[in-house]
């Protein structure tokens, strides 16, 4: 896929924030730091990392790695350096979306995979980014997705198999990085669109509609299944009788089953099909009646325009059974446990949040997704790899991203606690280097304050 991906650093900031962003520095030296990049299960202590332009120029033991004259110094004593994080399921090009692009970078998310949005807006941002004026994450994007019914997000409406090829042709002309298939596609249209994308060498990702099974989606060439749609939830018959009649969103959280899911996961692994479960988004669905969610803590960073848009496309339920919250949470816990089962079966699992939903605020949601991976059985090391090395591998970009090595793009996050002892320490951000551009501790705090001010909070 790498030959199709345009790697742009998005610099999109609200008015008043740009002054807080450090200009590109020719040389940055992070000295005496512990390097944790997913290549080894323990930190490489007391190392020095040299950044020259937007690349890692040198990496080695501090005692033997000289610091170039004139380099901007960051003291890494007691700190841990990780690669920039990926959020593999977001929506950026929506009303109010530009104003929070910088929030991803402030939270160490230097790259995202945009799963549907206004392609003209994304390409316009890319032009602005190339000029170096705005701050935000690197974006790999689908543009409009292929859908079989009307939805409030930019899409190509395809209701007949013969229309699938022309739809994919139009996406190829746009220059999208991959094709996303969505939930309302009839069975014959889904397979026609998948075949058209394969014939045109366009990568495939997306939802599993109810018209097909996850196994069939995998066999059709889809490289990532989003939200675990149509993957059942392990439940006993008794649990199924107790849960299903009283819970209104089974379509998202999966039907209950007592069948062994290992053969399905083994099949996905054999096909090289990855899964992006978006557990923080599923939490929001599972707790549909709740007026307060963990992600609401970060609402002050989000402008009203964005919050109104999200509320419009994902409204609160008017009425739900009294026990729906407890029932939903029980189902969600079972979905969380599935990520560990999938990983044990050899399925690649990637973190995505469906940001900017209420429970998935940009950047903050990714931190919580990684903590939820750990809850599902991932070690801190495996959770960190899932957000750094593995996305780069999935996208075919491991030659330039995903780890900290000389010659690779300088996407780095400096933490003041070890993520290998607790993955929640990815929240403990001191500084971020995005494509060689430094956001130090002072600038980062100023940026966060300015984002709140720009949101009118």
Image: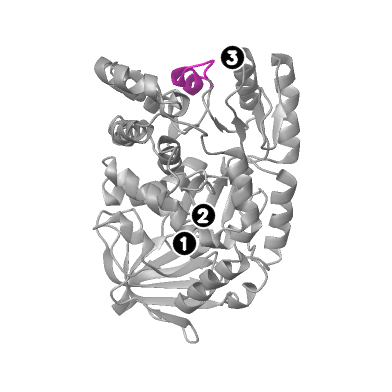
Q: Residue furthest top?
A: 188
Q: Is residue 105 magenta?
A: no
Q: Residues within 10 Å of mark 2 (few under 14, many from 20)?
A: many
How many tags in the picture? 3
The spot of residue 317 in percent (x, y) is 51, 34
**Residue 206 picture quarter:** top right
Labels 2 and 1: the sequence-earlier one: 1
The reply to whether discs 2 and 1 touch (Cβ–Cβ < 8 Å) is yes
In the rendered image, the vertical position of residue 83 relative to residue 141, given as above or below: below
Horizontal relation, residue 355 to residue 141: left or right: left
Would you say residue 97 is visible in this rendering? Answer: no
**Nearest-to-viewer mark from 2 and 3:** 2
Q: Where does the magenta region start and end? A: 210-220
- Look at the image and tell me in which quarter the N terminus lies: top right
> Secondary structure beneath disc 3?
helix
- Residue at which label 1 appears: 107
Q: Earlier in the sequence, mark 2 or mark 3?
A: 3
| Residue in the picture at 58% in, 55% down | 138
User: Which type of secondary structure does the marked residue at label 1 adopt?
Assistant: loop
In x, y percent, where is residue 424?
32, 57
Q: Which mark is residue 362?
A: 2
The reply to whether discs 2 and 3 touch (Cβ–Cβ < 8 Å) is no
């Amino acid at each position: 896929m790498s030959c199709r991906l345009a790697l742009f650093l998005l610099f999109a900031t609200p008015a008043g924030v740009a002054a807080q962003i450090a200009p590109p520095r020719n040389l940055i030296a992070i000295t005496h730091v512990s390097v944790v990049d997913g290549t080894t299960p323990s930190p490489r202590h007391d190392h020095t990392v040299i950044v020259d332009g937007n690349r890692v120029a040198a990496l080695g033991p501090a005692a033997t790695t000289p610091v170039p004259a004139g380099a901007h110094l960051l003291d890494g004593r007691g700190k841990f350096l990780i690669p920039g994080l990926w959020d593999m399921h977001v929506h950026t090009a929506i009303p109010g979306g530009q104003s929070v692009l910088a929030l991803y970078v402030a939270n160490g998310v230097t790259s995202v995979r945009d799963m549907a949005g206004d392609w003209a807006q994304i390409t316009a941002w890319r032009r602005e980014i190339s000029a170096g004026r705005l701050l935000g994450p690197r974006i790999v994007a689908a543009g409009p997705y292929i859908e079989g019914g009307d939805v409030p997000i930019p899409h190509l409406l395809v209701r007949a198999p013969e229309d699938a090829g022309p739809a994919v042709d139009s996406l190829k002309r746009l220059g999208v990085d991959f094709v996303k298939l969505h939930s309302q596609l009839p069975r014959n249209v889904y397979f026609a669109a998948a075949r058209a994308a394969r014939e045109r060498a366009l990568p495939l990702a997306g939802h599993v509609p109810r018209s097909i099974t996850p196994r069939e989606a995998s066999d059709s060439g889809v490289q990532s299944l989003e939200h675990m749609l149509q993957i059942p939830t392990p439940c006993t018959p008794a649990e199924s009788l107790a849960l299903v009649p009283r819970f209104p969103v089974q379509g998202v959280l999966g039907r209950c089953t007592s069948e062994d899911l290992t053969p399905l996961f083994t099949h996905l692994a054999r096909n090289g099909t990855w899964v992006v479960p978006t557990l923080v988004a599923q939490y929001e669905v599972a707790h549909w009646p709740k007026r307060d969610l963990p992600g609401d803590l970060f609402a002050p960073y989000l402008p009203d325009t964005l919050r109104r848009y999200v509320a419009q496309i994902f409204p609160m339920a008017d009425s739900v059974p009294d026990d729906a919250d407890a029932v939903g949470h029980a189902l969600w816990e079972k979905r969380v446990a599935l990520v560990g089962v999938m990983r044990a079966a050899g399925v690649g699992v990637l973190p995505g949040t469906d940001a900017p939903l209420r429970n998935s605020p940009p950047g903050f949601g990714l931190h919580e997704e990684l903590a939820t991976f750990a809850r599902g059985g991932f070690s801190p090391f495996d959770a960190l790899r899932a957000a750094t090395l593995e996305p780069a591998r999935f996208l075919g970009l491991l030659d330039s991203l995903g780890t900290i090595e000389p010659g690779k793009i300088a996407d780095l996050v400096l933490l003041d606690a070890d993520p290998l002892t607790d993955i929640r320490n990815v929240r403990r951000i001191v500084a971020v280097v995005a494509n060689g551009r430094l956001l130090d501790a002072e600038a980062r705090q100023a940026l966060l304050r300015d984002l709140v001010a720009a949101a009118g909070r």
